[in-house]
Image: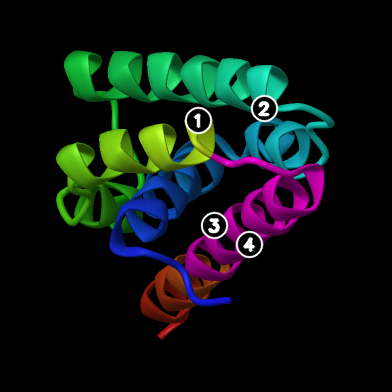
Amino acid sequence: MSLSKPIDNLAKALAVLVIEEENYSYIDKLGYAPSKDLALYYIKEALRDLHSLIRGGRFEKPYAKALISQVSFEEAERAIEEIGEIATRKQLRETLSMIASKALAISAKALVKEEKKEGG
């Protein structure tokens, strides 16, 4: 299963929250969401908090700020629509697990870069 461009952008948006706020709850909730309606609710929560970060210009971590500039919110919006169209629980679990895993990988990569820059 390959990630679509829209879902990849949603994963990047979630990764920003992990990097900037050191908060994994958005990813954990989404990765374990048992239903489509809960998954969409958790995405809404995360995007609302991300919106506050963007609007407030409160980015303290340079890699979070750099990553947010790479996110296409049009594509993230399409990802939400894709999730809304998922027909089976199995497909939902796979998709949500992929988004959560990708977000963790993206955030880990950014954090490693940040630590290397600060340490060396």
User: In the image, what residue occupies the spot 36% across and 77% down?
Assistant: 117
10 Å neighbourhood of mark 4: few (<14), some, or many (≥20)?
some
- Residue stretch in magenta: 86-107
Check residue 102 for magenta coloring.
Answer: yes
Q: How is the image coloured?
A: rainbow
Q: Amino acid at mark 4?
A: Met
Closer to the eye: label 2 or 4: 2
Please tell me whether the stretch drawn in magenta is mainly helix, strand or loop: helix
Looking at the rendered structure, the secondary structure element under dot 3 is helix
Q: Which mark is residue 103?
A: 3
10 Å neighbourhood of mark 2: few (<14), some, or many (≥20)?
many
Residue where numbered disc 2 is placed: 36
User: In the image, what residue occupies the spot 48% across and 50% down?
Assistant: 15
Of the two numbered discs 2 and 1 on the same chain, state the one appearing first in sequence.
2
Looking at the rendered structure, the secondary structure element under dot 4 is helix
State the image coordinates of residue 13 (x, y, percent, origin top left). 38, 43
Q: Mark 3–mark 1 contact, CB under 8 Å?
A: no
CA gap, disc 4 to disc 1? 16 Å
Residue where numbered disc 1 is placed: 84
Q: Is residue 42 above or below residue 59?
A: above
Q: Dividing the image into 4 quarters, which one contains the C terminus?
A: bottom left
**Left or right: residue 5 compared with residue 97:** left
Closer to the eye: label 4 or 1: 1
CA gap, disc 3 to disc 1? 19 Å
Looking at the rendered structure, the secondary structure element under dot 2 is helix
Check residue 100 for magenta coloring.
Answer: yes
Q: Which mark is residue 98?
A: 4
Q: Mark 2–mark 1 contact, CB under 8 Å?
A: yes
CA gap, disc 2 to disc 1? 7 Å
